[in-house]
Image (tube, rainbow, N blue to C red):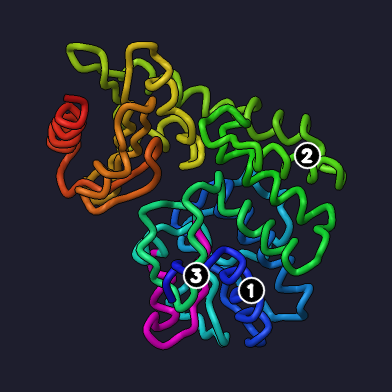
Amino acid sequence: MSTSLSYHEQLEGAIAFIQRYDSFLVVAHEQPDGDAISSCSAMTWLLEQYNKQVIIINESELPGRLSYLYQYDNIKRFNSEATLQFDAVIALDCADYSRLGEVRTLFTAEVTPLLNIDHHPTNNEFGTLNIIRSHAAATVEIIYDLIKYANLTPNLPCAIALYTGLLTDTGGFRYSNTSPEVMAMASELLALGVSAYELADHLLEKMTYARLKLLQTLLARISFSEDQRIGWVSVMHDDLATCGAVPEDLEGIVNYVLNVDSVEVGILFKETESGLVKASIRSAGKVDVASVAHSFGGGGHVRAAGCKMNADMNSSIETLVGAIRKALT
């Protein structure tokens, strides 16, 4: 169903979708971040208010720092041998159907009713019903609108989940997506009892010793284009194991590159187990990195996007940096 419907009609349709079915599979993109897991947490709370049965599954290992979130312990890792029964699927914070990973083998997109809620402008509307709000700072912002549309008030665990997604996807309310609506929502959640200090300290300030060792390793590897408008850092497959780090320890490292005052685009290249490379791209504003990522089969936002490169590290760097150079001209 097209997002040509008004936002009011989309929210109304989503509530009708929830009321129509008894059991749901709730999913988010692979390698989930704060917004993805928080969205699953808040959506589960909403479904429970309608006495629905909920299964939450993700392909990837979950970020341990988010273990305080509501229903975190009930999020299952994908298992191809698992036998599951559900009536409908709700996909959250997933710009592209393929980013659900192997979880999509649990259902048939053309047959299973699917509600797609997302804030990425590159979302290809793969759901039976789609709520795509590209100007929303985070998917939790849409879920909060849905909760309010249903005339419900989040309890504290739900409010904490909503605030977590907002905090992480706005970079602690520092990114350009920090809108008046974001600050109003944050204020309302604080009024419900959320502790801004505790969450900011836990999510934005504290780090493990392993992350510090990884950061030490990667900062020594930063490279720049000749004009210093493009910067990048490469992460080899064994770096995490060598430092005792986990995938979530890579979060935010690309910002160390982007924060150099001459840099317009920062890139983190991560070598996968197969030897191919994933790229996380960040823009200071002059380059639409979602468009660049889309040309390589990826997607995201104007200032934050990602893609997979079908090449080794050196070739991936050469190809993507070349594409960014063209975008800067």
- If the image is split into quadrants, where does the N terminus sit? bottom left
Look at the image and give the residue range highlighted in magenta: 101-118
Residue at point 65%, 46% (across, down)? 66
Element class at badge 1: helix
223 with respect to 301 (left or right) = left
Residue 317 seen in this snapshot: no
The reply to whether the C-beta atoms of the residues labelled 1 and 2 are less than 8 Å apart is: no
- Report x, y in % for residue 269: 29, 35
For marks 3 and 2, give the CA distance: 29 Å
Judging by the rendered image, the residue that carries numbered circle 1 is 12
Among the two numbered marks 3 and 2 on one chain, the one whose residue lies closer to the N terminus:
3
Looking at the image, residue 245 lies above or below residue 152: above
Judging by the rendered image, the residue that carries numbered circle 3 is 5
- Report x, y in % for residue 255: 44, 25
Residues packed near mark 1 inside 10 Å, few (<14), some (14 to 19) or many (20 plus)? some
What residue type is disc 2 on?
A: Ser
Q: Which mark is residue 187?
A: 2
For marks 1 and 2, give the CA distance: 25 Å
